[in-house]
Image (cartoon, helix red, strand yellow):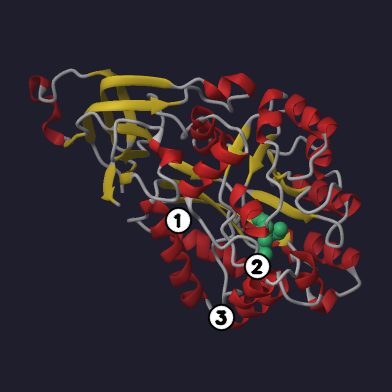
Amino acid sequence: MSENLIIFDARVVTPMGFAARKGAEMGELLVMDHATIEVTDGVITYVGPNRGENRDGYYQHYWHYNARGRCVLPGFVDSHTHFVFGGERADEFSWRLKGESYMSIMERGGGIVSTVKATRASNFIRLRAKAEGFLKQMNAMGVTTVEGKSGYGLDKETELMQLRIMRSLNGDEHRRVDIVPTFLGAHAVPQEYAGRTDDYIDFLIREVMPCVAEAGLAEFCDVFCEQGVFSIEQSRRLLLAARGMGFNLKLHADEIVPLGGAGLAAELSATSADHLLHASDADIRAMAEKGVVATLLPLTAFALKEPYARGRAMIDAGCAVALATDLNPGSCFSGSIPLTFALACIYMQMSIEEAITALTLNGAAALNRAGSIGSIEVGKKGDLVVLNTDNYHFLPYYIGMNCVIATIKEGVIYPS
Ligand code: NIG
Ligand code: FE
């Protein structure tokens, strides 16, 4: 569903452009007071000074919204989540509180594999209903586009089911959030393939990925490139095959140990490399040169009590940095946009302006959508958020609390 909408007296706060903003450009926002935003059939057709909302009766076929000086930003783009899954892992969370590590839980058969069991045991309707609940919560925090990964099936049937759930939610006429699907069959090695990681990769390449590609069920292929999961060589083999089938590439890179996943992302010119807690200086420079979006997930570092990714160093090296939540039942059971803003600004030395670019235009670039979303400009989708204040500094300052009062999806207003 799309609408005609005229917003007047807005304080527009937006990055500008139709591609990722890199390095120092990330801090450059347009701030325009007393602005009008015109959305026609869901697409932005005017942004500029107020023109009087009833000019020649032209706007009689538009919904009217008076922003009364409040901030209006582009809709937030959460470019890394795992929001379709069965079960929960609250027990593991309590073990981690007692000192056990994320990887040691995974090594003894918990972690991702335990969510795989719960997801396989569930069904389309139940998984869809649960995923839809997350989408509603995300939307209330201003998210208008979300990436979602498979990776809790690790068999053909359940991987395809996760992707079909995303397709069905995306096709919902009343959807508030667009979904970009990613195939993450290489999230862990399932028990049937224990000790046979290369055979599992062969299975994905020969039997699963061709079906996903043929049905157009995923735009991206991702891999958990990590010590004890998928090595650099195995990740490279999988991603090269994926590229040959038409997928764009993403990596979970250098999350737990410095393995060199960020360097592999640069070598393959992946769209993004994600996590990057332990990315080396040389690999950061390589990502900047190749235009790989560095997607940082501060909620995961927070939840795992790990050091934060070096957002400041990456921006200073000329990278395009995106921020995302990583919502998943294990390492980070949170899709909180407000807390993501706060952690990025307080602990990763990102400026408020850079964090806004990272959650809008650069998030869009991490999904190959910088041409159609991520900024308030003519020709882009009318995906917007309205804050309860004229001061956009509230985004990180109002810590973990929601200052979004309305989310607008292609010109349709949804109060938070
Ligand atoms: O991004 N690291 C791998 N994948 C997720 C965690 C998934 C899970 O624990 O269920 C992540 O942290
Ligand atoms: Fe993840």
Disc marking residue 170: 1
Instruction: Say few, some or many: other residues with alpha carbon within 10 Å of mark 3 (under 14 / 14 to 19 / 20 or more).
Output: some
Amino acid type of the residue that numbered disc 2 sits on in the rendered structure? Glu
Disc marking residue 193: none
Residue 365 in sight in this render: yes
* Percent x, y of residue 366: 61, 39
* Percent x, y of residue 4: 23, 37
Using the rendered view, name the quadrant where residue 136 is placed: bottom left
Disc marking residue 159: 2
- The residue that label 3 is drawn on is 122
Instruction: Say few, some or many: other residues with alpha carbon within 10 Å of mark 1 (under 14 / 14 to 19 / 20 or more).
Output: some
Q: Judging from the image, what secondary structure is the residue with disc 2 in?
A: helix
The residue mark sitting in front, 2 or 3, is 3
Q: Earlier in the sequence, mark 3 or mark 1?
A: 3
Q: Earlier in the sequence, mark 2 or mark 3?
A: 3
* Percent x, y of residue 207: 77, 66
Instruction: Say few, some or many: other residues with alpha carbon within 10 Å of mark 2 (under 14 / 14 to 19 / 20 or more).
Output: many
Q: Residue sitting at 59 percent across and 62 percent down? A: 328
Amino acid type of the residue that numbered disc 3 sits on in the rendered structure? Ser
Q: Residue sitting at 58 percent across and 34 percent down? A: 365
Residue 367 in sight in this render: no
- Gap between marks 1 and 2 measured at Cα: 17 Å
Using the rendered view, name the quadrant where residue 367 is placed: top right
Amino acid type of the residue that numbered disc 1 sits on in the rendered structure? Asn
